[in-house]
Image (tube, helix red, strand yellow):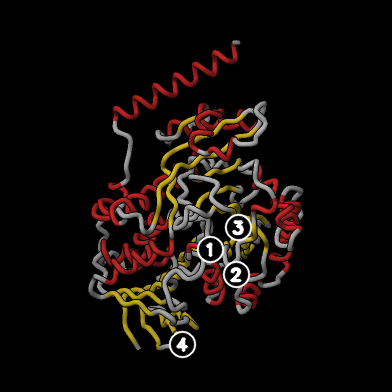
Amino acid sequence: MSDTDLVIIGGGISGASLLYTVAKFTDVEDVTLIEKEREIAAINSHRTNNSQTLHFGDIETNYTLEKAEEVKEGAELLAGYLEGEDPDREMHSKRSKMVLGVGDEEVAKLEERYRENGFGDLFPKLREIGREEIEELEPKVVEGRDPGTELKALQTPDGYVVDYGAVAKSFVDAAREEEGVSVHLGTAVTNVDDRGDDFLVETDDGDFDAEAVVVAAGSHSLQFAKEMGYGEGMSLLPVAGSFFLADDLLNGKVYTLQMKKLPFAAVHGDADVHDDGITRFGPTAKLVPALERGHLSTVSDFVDVFGFNPDSVLSYVNILSDRILFPYVVRNLVYDLPVVGKRAFLPDVQKVVPSVDVDDIDRAKGYGGVRPQIVDTENKELDMGEAKITEDGILFNITPSPGASTALKNAMTDVETVLGFFEDDYEFDESAFRDATIENFPRLDETEADEEADADADANDEVAAEADD
């Protein structure tokens, strides 16, 4: 039996960022991280299993302004960490990114979003650009496209492409420099027992006596919660994302506009974080009855979470009968079929790069993870965003997208919760935390901001003049 103050279950980006924050910026004396895999970030945080995007909310057109404001701070915290700790760009690269509007209707939506909905003000580096500038940045986006089709993009240089697995390992390495930190890999937690004053965390390699516990195990977090009698009004809709690969076609990230009512990321194209000679297109979104991609053993874990009770079944029926969501789900099943699949997906690719042919793309093998979409079984609907369950001394962190982008912001919030478990016996040095993270984020200085404002004004004058003509 090992005694510790805090046990963190899960060594993905979420658990690793919390370990880093507790170890480096609080005076908690003893913290233990337990991960069932033999390496940190082996599942959804692995670079091949996610979109490698640091979401700011600037080009994600399914975000409201309020959500973008929340996500922006989280992204800047992580971007600042990368700027300070990864000057040689071993964990990330920085490229242009844009959301592309094709045709009059989409262009009008982007203009409204930028000028009237406040996104231009919230993101000072975000610019409206037309066909010529798009072509300068991304020649393949314009090549082969009908010259009579209206084209516009919202573009920014703050396109962080991130190897979240490498970042998670960096967090753990930094935490291990501190006294009182222990990390147990290849160790599966078999049971968590709430004993009133503390918790017994049982594993296949010994037990831990902890004053507080945080479960940061992705889809499995809800499974742990339900085993302990919590989260009864929740279920999961596991969605497996996949990608198609092509040769070097894009210099940065090019997003398309989000379909309404869909909780899944819009199809986009971008270069891989470690190989800019590869262009990835996706993600697709296929419903799967498992908590981990390619691990049949997690089918039974999904059954535990789903429960097969009337509320869960009716929730699925209600969600999947939606006239927009159901065709989308069926279409994504088709994408997995040999030969037919990539032909079906080709129009989504051509929306980004018109000249691509079916022979230019192939299904990416070994790419894509499972993202748990939260189901509210009381209201029979999807509950968009991140979810937490907080009980006395224990926190269950369930983080669908953009969980990786906001990992440090979640960690900052979770630290305050955890310190409350200890009745404020410990303190969090938020100032030092911000100095190590968000204070390193590069911002426009006043001169650059004025130049950007003048450029935007000139662009708006040109648009107005064209309209008058």
Q: What is the number of the mark on residue 204?
A: 4
Q: CA distance from mark 3 to mark 4?
A: 35 Å
Work out whether mark 4 precedes mark 1 in sequence or the reverse, and give the earlier one. Answer: 1
Q: Give how far across and how far down residue 167 sits, in percent.
A: 38, 61
Q: Give how far across and how far down residue 350 sits, in percent.
A: 66, 44
From the image, state whether disc 4 or disc 2 is nearer to you: 2
Work out whether mark 4 precedes mark 2 in sequence or the reverse, and give the earlier one. Answer: 4
Disc 4: CA contacts within 10 A as few (<14), some (14-19) or many (>=20): few
Residue at 31 percent across and 73 percent down: it is: 31
Along the viewing direction, whichever of 352 and 107 lies nearer the viewer: 352
Residue at 40 percent across and 51 percent down: it is: 93
Work out whether mark 3 precedes mark 4 in sequence or the reverse, and give the earlier one. Answer: 4
Q: Which residue is mark 3?
A: 243
State which quadrant residue 383 falls in.
Answer: bottom right
Q: Which residue is mark 1?
A: 49
Q: Are marks 3 and 2 in contact (CB under 8 Å)?
A: no
